[in-house]
Amino acid sequence: MANRNYKGLDSVTVADVEALGIPTELAGIIYEKVSRIVGDYGAATPQTWHCISKEVLNPNIPFTFHQMMYYGCYKDFGPDPPAWLPDPAVAYALETLGLEKGSAIAIDMPMDVNSVVIYLAIVLAGYVVVSIADSFAPSEISTRLILSKAKAIFTQDFISRGDKKIPLYSRVVDAHSPMAIVIPNRASSLSIELRDGDISWPDFLERVKDSKGLEFVAVEQPIDAFTNILFSSGTTGDPKAIPWTLLTPFKAAADGWCHMDIKRGDVVAWPTNLGWMMGPWLVYASLLNGASIALYNGSPLGSGFAKFVQDAKVTMLGVIPSIVRTWKAKNSPDGYDWSTIRCFGSTGEASSVDEYLWLMGRAEYKPIIEYCGGTEIGGSFVSGSLLQPQSLAAFSTAVMGCSLHILGDDGFPIPSDVPGIGELALGPLIFGASSTLLNADHNEVYFKGMPVFNGKVLRRHGDVFERTSKGYYHAHGRADDTMNLGGIKVSSLEIERICNVVDENILETAAVGVPPAGGGPEKLVIAVVFKGSDKLEHDLVNLLISFNTALQRKLNPLFKVSSIVPLPSLPRTATNKVMRRVLRQQFSQADQGSRL
């Protein structure tokens, strides 16, 4: 260690600090802080430097003082003194909550550095993450907390969206959450009052200030131990609680490596949230393959994100089609250099050929890897590959370790080399896929009633797929009554429960997702039967506004009804079940200009 001429930190005086040009009053404050840290951790430990660098130093203090602290701390340390240490608070502070190992701890936050560190710390310490999207209304937050039996929740006071501050902690409180640890939004302290029993982020970290450990030893667990509880809508109206195990991260990492060539040195950006599977997927697919994650703090829809992609030198950019549509309309990437991108990934909803042709052109025609899977899969079952020619809005192969089967009209798989369209079934053995559900019978949901192929019962997924004559795959939406709205899967019943009570003149409704004729994500169409069904005249414009207001307030602010179709009655089966698939077909075939 060079620079032995510096004093040890226990010998530094206020006069030494003032001598560096620091005003007397500020010098006194700095000296008191340094003295306290030295008293807590000693004059020459890595933890001492760590605390000084975090609590005392900043760019406005003369660099000569930075040198005094660094070289003084490590005066007699020897070679390779650490300039940065991982914060032991990544997991130690969780231990102070007094929870049993395996307890569920929720995260309801934007996906940023804090939430990713919290996510990894929960897993590292032997607890289970409960993923909740930061866009959810209190009732949806409450449902997920109850299903997962969460014992605590990490959240944020507000979410910044441009100049707007959107309350988040208040929604968590309205959901009657367990103990909350509340992180301030881009500020050093909270500006809101907390409930009794809730903890501010600084106070939470303060619990481990006396920890001398430099590395938290991960809790060893069996391979089938739960690490994450995520949620995917089912056809019953209740979200399915899907646990990920210690195997699932390796499924995500394998997909990223095999199909998107994510590797050491890459920078991966994918606008998403830890409340949806692509958030945890991004964490594992990047970090386990040695890549970095680029996290943007703000909306990905504008030119600010386009500049971020340029400045971060992103090499793999993940998208959903609705984001691309907005970029194209606003020409958001114009003037920015995306030449470092090696490939795009796309998931969440059906894509458009023309929009994706435009996207490829923003990065000198780098390939777009379509990626389709599910929360219960832990990744994808059909994707693209950099080893094959890629067609727009199409998948070129089953994902490594998966087998795909398109069911014919007789309910059995058609030959693998024959073009056709039908419900997609999966081979039952998928590395990392779910084997249990917390609130439903896994076998009944995914295997009951499915055909046997080569001695194995196939796994249900619920999508309709087409295999073309050239061997590519195209997605054609959901086979059941779950729809995909802007990359978010939701059951028809969840939407109908809300719409049915919006207007006293409504008898019943049916919600269906309808793919546009020109391709792209499904549009939400509500079929309405009014009381006194012989009179279909109604103020549909105001009703549309009322539907959107209710859905966005009670279910998800991202949902939007595209149109309303009044009907004298809903088509039903002999057992009185609503045939939403019939409605979907009718609306798809209807004149787009006059009906939808």
Image (cartoon, rainbow, N blue to C red):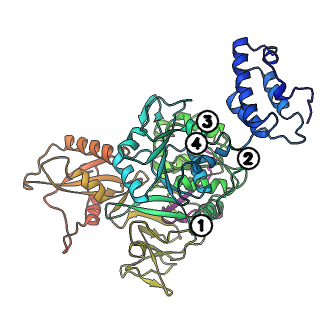
Asked if the residue at tag 3 contacts the one at tag 4, i.e. Cβ–Cβ closer than 8 Å, the answer is: no
Q: Amino acid at mark 2?
A: Leu
Numbered range of the magenta stretch: 362-388
Q: Nearer the viewer, mark 2 or mark 1?
A: 2
Q: Horizontal and vertical percent for residue 60?
A: 70, 20
Q: Which sits earlier in the primary sequence, circle 2 or circle 4?
A: 4
For disc 2, the marked residue is 214
For disc 3, the marked residue is 336
Q: Residues within 10 Å of mark 2 (few under 14, many from 20)?
A: few
The residues bearing labels 2 and 1 have C-alpha atoms spaced at a distance of 28 Å
Q: Which sits earlier in the primary sequence, circle 2 or circle 1?
A: 2
Q: Amino acid at mark 1?
A: Leu
The numbered mark at residue 114 is 4
For disc 1, the marked residue is 247
Q: Amino acid at mark 4?
A: Asn
Q: Residues within 10 Å of mark 4 (few under 14, many from 20)?
A: few
Residue depicted at x 10% and y 54%: 531
Q: Is residue 546 left or right of residue 143?
A: left
The numbered mark at residue 420 is none
Q: Residues within 10 Å of mark 3 (few under 14, many from 20)?
A: some
Q: Is residue 376 magenta?
A: yes
Q: Which sits earlier in the primary sequence, circle 3 or circle 1?
A: 1
The residues bearing labels 2 and 4 have C-alpha atoms spaced at a distance of 19 Å
Residue depicted at x 36% and y 43%: 557
Q: Which sits earlier in the primary sequence, circle 2 or circle 3?
A: 2
Q: Horizontal and vertical percent for residue 495?
A: 29, 54
* Observer able to see residue 421: no
